[in-house]
Image (cartoon, rainbow, N blue to C red):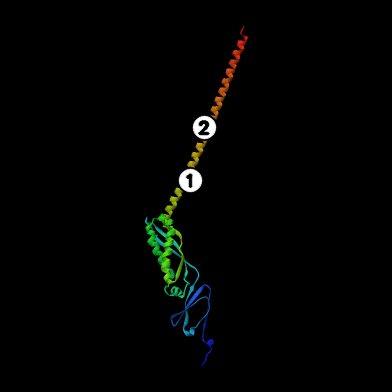
Amino acid sequence: DHRDLHSFPTRRSSDLQDVVKLTEQLGRFDQILRPGLHFVWPCLCQTVAGTLSTRIQQCEIRAEAKTKDDVFVTLRVAVQYRINMEDDSTIFNANYKLSNHVQQIEAFVYDVVRSSVPKIALDDVFVSKDEISQEIKGQLCKQMADFGFVILASPITDIEPDTKVKTAMNEINRAKRMLTVAEDEGEATKARVLKDAEAAAAATEIQAKAEAEAKFLAGEGIARQRQAIISHRRRRRPR
């Protein structure tokens, strides 16, 4: 008998703009359902086997390693990634090749951090964090491409030394700041002393000049008095 297609049980799958779904039939991969309206036929043993987000995702990873100068340090790495939507094969790989892609990303980050950090001292870790970040991204891009993922960025967001070392570093920095303050105060005191000395020297010079001028004027006055006396006596002398 001819039976209407609508009499078979169906399941409607309205895929959102930010997801793709993969279906299987009789336990075998069937097709990829991209955003839009699709129908799944349970009566034909068709089921949705996986749902993947197409949005950019981020996982925060804390990786600990020992530096060249024997200091344990923890790096926080923020890995940003998404599914490679270029073709169906990359979407297939993203769903079927890995059971937990976050754990795989973490493993690759740990590998890079624990192979690069031991080669440099603690101070250089802070200076070289961009280089370490690029090395992590390069390793992830190469490894995760086979699993259908694109790595967008892997910045190191924080570097945390061991608590005791961090405390010691803070004490060293505080001592340096105190030394700088003391040096600044010493320079200020030195400047004030020099300024006061210069002012005192200038005042002494001015006073000396004033005294010399006064003595000069007093000498001129005495000389004029003597000259006047001599002139007066000459006028009174009988001819």
Q: In the structure shown, which secondary structural element does the residue marked by tag 1 occupy?
A: helix
Horizontal and vertical percent position of residue 179: 45, 46
Upstream in the sequence, badge 2 or badge 1? 1
Q: Tag on residue 150?
A: none
Mark 2: amino acid: Ala
Horizontal and vertical percent position of residue 47: 47, 80
**Relative to 97, residue 172 above or below:** above
**To which quarter of the image does residue 134 belong?**
bottom left
| Image quadrant containing the C terminus | top right
**Relative to 12, residue 172 above or below:** above
Instruction: Say which residue label 2 marks.
Output: 201
Mark 1: amino acid: Val
**Relative to 110, residue 227 above or below:** above
Q: Is residue 168 left or right of residue 238?
A: left
Q: In the structure shown, which secondary structural element does the residue marked by tag 2 occupy?
A: helix
CA gap, disc 2 and disc 1: 30 Å
**To which quarter of the image does residue 159 belong?**
bottom left
Q: Tag on residue 181?
A: 1
Viewer-side residue, 102 vs 149: 149
Horizontal and vertical percent position of residue 46: 47, 82
